Amino acid sequence: MSLNFRKTRFVGVAANLGQCPMDGLPEIVLSGRSNVGKSSLINTIAGQKQLARVSSTPGKTKLVVYFNVEDKLYLTDLPGYGFTKTGHHKKQDFSSLVDTYLTGERPIALVLHLLDIRHEPSGLDVQMIAWLEANDMPYRVILTKCDKLSRQQISQQVQVMTKLLDLEEDVNLIAFSALNRTGMSELRELVASVVGETAASVD
């Protein structure tokens, strides 16, 4: 069977585990810095421009945001970390919510950790990858905004990121662009494979 990403819909938000969906659907969790492009990625693979709001102010989203894909899985957008204008106390809240979520026995099938391909991973990025490795959490690294670089530069950055993050050979990085849709088909197939399906051709 095939998974139709155009049937993705926003279903709600959660400020704590008690507000999370309890239907047991597998979750594809998106993590990364506040301005790394998680909302743009969701809009692109869903084929809907306004599904996930793209904020002009990094750090604005403070909640876990849920998108249901054809009643078969969730795309779960975790609060971004890093730059925020809401103050130190709130930054601690964000970290606590993310930590609680990842360790709270949620039905997480895969974590997509997003990195801006143009910049070296932050200390928090390195910590996140190390935590995922230590806890045997299935994950893939998505390098966003690759339209900003040439093909040769993308290839070079993939090698650099693999070395900086000390990634295993079987952790393939996906270069992705919301602008020119590079990597979209590969990403859709990856997400669909979590529920044993292929991605429907809808574009």
Image: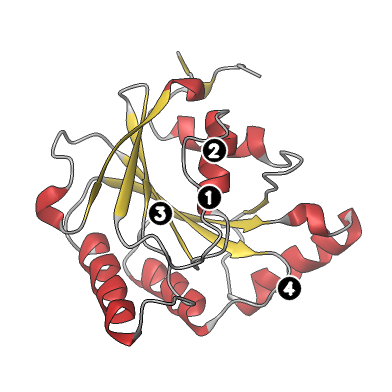
In primary-sequence order, the first of circles 4 and 1 is: 1
Query: What percent of the width, then of the height, locates residue 187?
Result: 58, 39
Mark pair 4, 2: CA separation: 28 Å
Q: Crowding at label 4, few (<14), some or many (≥20) Cα neighbours within 10 Å?
A: some
Residue corresponding to mark 2? 43
Q: Is residue 62 above or below residue 138?
A: below
Front tag of 4 and 1:
1
Task: Tell me residue 51's x, y (percent).
Answer: 47, 35
Say which element carries label 1. Answer: loop
Q: CA distance from mark 2 to mark 3?
A: 23 Å
Q: Quadrant of the N terminus?
A: top left
Q: In the image, which disc is placed on residue 138?
A: 3
- In this figure, which residue is indicated by the disc labeled 4? 160
- Looking at the image, which is closer to me, 8 or 176? 8
Q: Are marks 1 and 2 in contact (CB under 8 Å)?
A: yes
Amino acid type at circle 4 is Val
- Measured from the top left, where is residue 155 in percent x and y? 82, 60
Q: Residues within 10 Å of mark 2 (few under 14, many from 20)?
A: many
Considering only order in the chain, which callout, 3 or 2, is on the residue closer to the N terminus? Answer: 2
What element does badge 3 sit on?
A: loop
Q: How is the image coloured?
A: secondary structure
Q: Residue at x 49, y 66 (%)?
A: 34
